[in-house]
């Protein structure tokens, strides 16, 4: 459904943008409805850049990103807005995704202004309740609160609920659990699993291999912008072909098994 | 014995009252021991670490004593602590990567730090260079600005710099959390290497990641809501934890091999209680699956054999 076809992204760097850095180098993969694909790599591997280019936050210099057969880079104004109805992102730091001056549910109000200006109050409330229920939050716990009154896990789930208001098909989850505690982390991860069961396609970006293994159906391992290994998760983890993948897997800390 | 903490209480001042972040903590760290300090955010683990080196302005020492190598550590007296900081107790802060001054080259930063302690840079420099090489950094990094180095390099530099005077105790606060798996492994192994080479006598490694602690720590101490929950050797904590909180923390870890499709791991429902007015009795009671009526009385933190300490009525039975 969402397909990347030989995508490359180049950033301008240096004082006057004289230099350039190839952040994503000829990457191809596709995600289907009802599946989780994880992009795994170390810092600088281009995994976030890929997520941002899917969300059209950075342009791809070459290659094509298509959503249901339509080239994403050709979308303008109304079409682009329609695209965002279907494709949304949630990012790493829940505390900086919210404006501390507004109450946390302000993020819902902006969605209403942008996408559902004509909806009656009652219908809108019901929609919010449904979205909150989908992320297992109780409305009384989170509505009308300021961001500092909520935990990181609650804020992160609020952002997922915000994305769900838009009947999305694709969720780009960029390191959404790396700032959370182990105890809440697993609940947000299970939420992604539940959303997958509802038919969403999820692009899960992480540097944590054990989390990627837990949740994803397909795995793409990236190194310096290039794909080094890709395939079904059990294959990649069970029979890594590439030395880099093997080195990464060896560095994952396990309980009860010491590094050698 | 290297470090002994007796009944330490450190509160945060706030307009609404005292936040009891460290509330009656007693512990020992022996020479050569790397103690892991684990728990969720807001359980007081960073506060405990900070209290041993520098109280920030909002923190207030209330009670308790700290002894390091037989000498009292005057944690309540910021000025008196100055002589002990860096030389006896040192810290690698949570965001070590941003602990470096962006306007200074690393060499100048090291020189200024030593001069602030009344030491000359020149005689120490060869040792600094030797240790940098030990962690895979060349002497030329001393001519770089922090912005020219990667996160892992900065982390290694800070670790070398903060242990340069061979402190007795190193407090390592979340030093691996922001790093990639391979860098994480390298930094964690460095800490062990520094202990083995006796650059440091003992260390407290604060993190919420039990799987990294299981790799490097000799003992693990689990804190919950300002109190100690359980302490034992790493093997015991991993294989036979007694406190329900420790068990649940371990249960949330997705090991490579466990998949959502096969087995759904459970998180810990709820949040740690507010430490402004902590609940009476066992503070884990509201989230605990084993809680009974007697948990309304605070369980004692006591031994259940062979250096294994636990604060739970159900577990100690």
Image: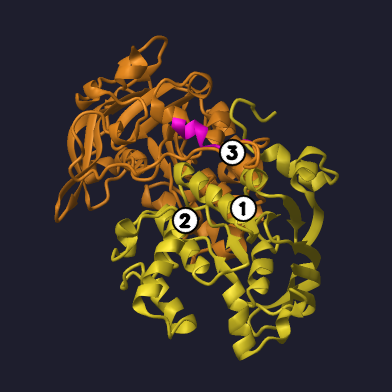
As displayed, is residue B167 above or below residue A154?
above
The answer to whether residue A191 is left or right of residue A9 is left
The answer to whether residue B190 is left or right of residue B231 is right
Is residue B122 among what the camera can see? no
Residue B36, how many percent across, how many down? 46, 31
Q: Please name which of the two marks, 1 or 2, marks the residue nearer to the observer.
A: 1
Subunit bearing disc 3? B
In the depicted view, which residue is nearer to us: B15 or A14?
B15
Tell me the residue at 68%/62% (across/down): A47
Where, quadrant-wise, is the N terminus of chain B in this rendering?
top left
- Residue on which the image places disc 3: B254
Which badge, 1 or 2, comes first in the chain's sequence?
2
- Residue on which the image places disc 2: A135
Residue A2, how many percent across, how many down? 73, 68
Residue B179, how many percent across, how many down? 58, 50
- Residue on which the image places disc 1: A197
**Distance (Cα) linking label 2 and label 3:** 20 Å
Where, quadrant-wise, is the C terminus of chain B in this rendering?
top left
Magenta-span inclusion, residue B250? yes
Q: Quadrant of residue B4?
A: top left
Which chain is rendered yellow in the image? A
Tell me the residue at 35%/74% (across/down): A122
Q: Secondary structure at mark 2?
A: loop
Residue B205, how many percent across, how many down? 46, 36
Q: Quadrant of residue B35?
A: top left
**Distance (Cα) linking label 1 and label 2:** 13 Å
In the depicted view, which residue is nearer to us: B202 or A20?
A20
Q: Secondary structure at mark 1?
A: helix
Magenta segment, which residues? B248-255
In this view, the residue farthest toward the right is A241
Which chain is rendered orange in the image? B
């Amino acid at each position: 459904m969402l397909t990347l076809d030989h995508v490359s992204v180049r950033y301008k760097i240096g004082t006057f943008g004289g230099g350039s850095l190839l952040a994503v180098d000829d990457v191809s993969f596709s995600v289907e409805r009802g599946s989780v694909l994880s992009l795994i790599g170390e810092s600088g591997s281009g995994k976030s850049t890929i997520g941002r280019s899917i969300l059209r936050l950075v342009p791809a210099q070459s290659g094509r990103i298509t959503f249901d057969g339509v080239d994403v880079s050709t979308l303008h104004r109304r079409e682009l807005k329609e695209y965002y109805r279907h494709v949304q992102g949630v990012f790493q730091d829940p505390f900086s995704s919210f404006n501390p001056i507004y109450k946390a549910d302000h993020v819902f109000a902006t969605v209403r202004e942008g996408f559902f200006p004509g909806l009656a109050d009652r219908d809108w409330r019901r929609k919010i309740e449904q979205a909150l229920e989908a992320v297992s939050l109780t409305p009384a716990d989170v509505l009308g609160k300021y961001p500092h009154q909520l935990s990181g896990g609650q804020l992160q789930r609020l952002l997922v609920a915000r994305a769900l208001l838009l009947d999305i098909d694709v969720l780009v989850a960029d390191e959404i659990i790396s700032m959370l505690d182990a105890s809440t982390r697993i609940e947000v991860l299970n939420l992604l699993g539940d959303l997958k069961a509802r038919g969403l396609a999820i692009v899960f970006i992480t540097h944590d291999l054990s989390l990627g293994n837990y949740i994803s159906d397909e795995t793409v391992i990236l190194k310096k912008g290039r794909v080094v290994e890709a395939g079904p998760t059990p294959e990649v983890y069970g029979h890594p072909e590439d030395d880099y993948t093997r080195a990464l897997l060896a560095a994952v800390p396990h309980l009860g098994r010491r590094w050698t | 014995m290297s470090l002994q903490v007796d009944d330490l209480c450190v509160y945060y001042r706030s307009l609404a009252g005292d936040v009891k972040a460290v509330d009656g903590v007693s512990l020992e760290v022996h020479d050569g021991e790397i103690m892991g300090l684990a728990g969720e955010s807001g359980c007081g683990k960073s506060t405990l670490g900070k209290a041993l080196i520098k109280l920030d302005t909002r923190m207030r020492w209330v009670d308790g004593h700290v002894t390091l190598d037989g000498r009292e550590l005057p944690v309540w007296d910021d000025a008196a602590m100055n002589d002990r900081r860096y030389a006896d107790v040192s810290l690698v802060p949570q965001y070590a990567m941003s602990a470096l001054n962006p306007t200074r080259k690393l060499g100048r930063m090291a020189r200024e730090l030593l001069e602030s302690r009344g030491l000359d840079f020149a005689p120490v420099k060869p040792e600094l260079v030797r240790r940098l090489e030990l962690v895979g950094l060349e002497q030329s990094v001393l001519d770089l600005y922090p912005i020219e180095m990667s996160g892992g390099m900065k982390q290694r530099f800070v670790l070398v710099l903060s242990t340069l005077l061979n402190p007795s105790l190193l407090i390592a606060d979340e030093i691996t959390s922001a790093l990639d798996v391979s860098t994480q492994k390298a930094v964690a192994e460095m800490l062990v290497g520094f202990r083995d080479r006796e650059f440091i006598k003992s260390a407290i490694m604060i993190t919420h990641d039990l799987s990294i602690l299981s790799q490097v720590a000799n003992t693990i101490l689990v804190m919950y809501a300002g109190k100690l929950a359980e302490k034992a050797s790493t093997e015991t904590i991993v294989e036979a934890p007694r406190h329900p909180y420790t068990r649940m923390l371990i249960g949330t870890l997705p090991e490579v091999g466990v998949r959502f499709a096969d087995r759904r791991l459970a998180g810990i429902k709820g949040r740690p209680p507010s430490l402004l007015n902590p609940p009476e009795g066992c503070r884990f009671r509201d989230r605990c699956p084993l809680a009974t009526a007697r948990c309304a009385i605070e369980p004692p933190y006591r031994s259940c054999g062979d250096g294994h300490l636990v604060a739970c009525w159900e577990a100690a039975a």
